[in-house]
Image (spheres, rainbow, N blue to C red):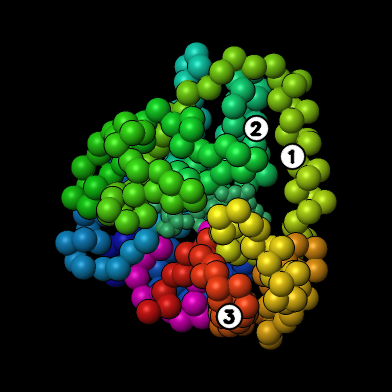
Amino acid sequence: MIDKLNKYGEVLENVSLKKYNTYRIGGIAKYIVIPNDVESLQELIKFLNANQIKYMILGNGSNVIFSDKTYDGAIIKLDKLNNVEIDGLQVTAEAGVMLPKLVQTCVNNNLQGLEWASGIPGTVGGSIVGNAGAYKSEISDFLINVTVIDKNGNIKTLKANEIDFQYRHSSLKDKLKDLVVISAVFGLKPGNKEESLKVMEDRRTRRVESQPLEYPSAGSIFRNPEGDFAGRIIECDVKLKGKTIGGAKVSEKHANFIINYNNASSQDVRDLIDLIHSKVLENNNIDLIVEPEFVNWE
Ligand SMILES: Cc1cc2nc3c(=O)[nH]c(=O)nc-3n(C[C@H](O)[C@H](O)[C@H](O)COP(=O)(O)OP(=O)(O)OC[C@H]3O[C@@H](n4cnc5c(N)ncnc54)[C@H](O)[C@@H]3O)c2cc1C
């Protein structure tokens, strides 16, 4: 198999997923494939579908919770789709570009709008699929169009309004799940580099002060329920701040973060999520929704 996959790009075999997600958890990936370019990605997708080989696209792995099991298929990383181009007020970014790099490039070119995203450790592709957001902005607010590859390897461009975006969710996660995002065009406003840098610094300070960034995690673990904060409920109502299971811990700094405190297994993280979920359901009658996606648990 590896000699077949090699045609499309760099291939790693039987590698730990721990290096490929911000939680630093997970089992072994049978294959990780890093396609050389868009054409290789098209051919790879055709090959995997024709041979019924399971696959998924992985961005920076900052919104996934892998199980401890082996992923018996191909994990595709778009690290080589890493280009940003600016044309007036429009910015085209490939799916593998990290948001902090995208924001910095825009700001350097006096383009304003995406400053809120400078501390989000995700790729453009993953952030569009999950409609990443912060400080009352979300990525879909700035999208003009998204270019994708379908499972037959065909490229098409969708206008932003052809994708249904909701709070931390898009139809690319369900109805349009077969599509792989390869690039997107953002519409920004003329700005001022110094002012944008000030906004970014303010957001960075807020994150450093409020989030346990010194530990591996996947960011906020639960979506905030209507009119309340998951962190407040976990800390004040069910009093689980600081609770540990194995190497996983409810952060002392922010109770809506479960951190990989000490070599946690995926199961430790999941057990702690389940514990919080059931306590909050019992105590508050609120069915908290987990924000990151469980992968390879079935
Ligand atoms: C410390 C920390 C802080 C965070 N703060 C925020 C925040 O403020 N706001 C916020 O919204 N999120 C936040 N997150 C969560 C996370 O960074 C975002 O959700 C981010 O957008 C995920 O991007 P990713 O590339 O890591 O996606 P991944 O986790 O790699 O993937 C997420 C999903 O998208 C799919 N996917 C990835 N790329 C593609 C593609 N090209 N085509 C099709 N499907 C694809 C994957 O298959 C998976 O289903 C935070 C995370 C951490 C660790």
Residue at which label 1 appears: 203
Residue plotted at (36% across, 75% down): 72
| Whether label 2 touches label 1, CB < 8 Å | yes
Can residue 62 be seen from the camera position used here? no
Hey, what amino acid is under mark 3? Glu
Mark 1 surroundings: few (<14), some (14-19) or many (≥20) residues within 10 A? some
Residue plotted at (72% across, 81% down): 244
Hey, what amino acid is under mark 2? Glu
User: Which sits earlier in the primary sequence, circle 3 or circle 1?
Assistant: 1
Q: Nearer the viewer, mark 3 or mark 1?
A: 3
Mark 3 surroundings: few (<14), some (14-19) or many (≥20) residues within 10 A? few
Measure how far apart labels 2 and 3 are at the Cα level.
39 Å
User: Which label belongs to residue 282?
Assistant: 3
User: Which sits earlier in the primary sequence, circle 2 or circle 1?
Assistant: 2
| Whether label 2 touches label 3, CB < 8 Å | no
Instruction: Work out whether 88 lies above or below 234.
Output: above
Q: Answer whether residue 74 is magenta in the image.
A: yes
Whole-percent x, y for residue 209 in the image:
82, 51
User: Which label belongs to residue 115?
Assistant: 2
Residue plotted at (21% across, 68% down): 52
The image shows a total of numbered marks equal to 3
Q: Secondary structure at mark 3?
A: helix
Q: Is mark 3 within 8 Å of ligand 1?
A: no
The quadrant holding residue 94 is top left
Q: Say which quadrant the C terminus sits in.
A: bottom left
Q: Nearer the viewer, residue 250 or 149?
A: 250
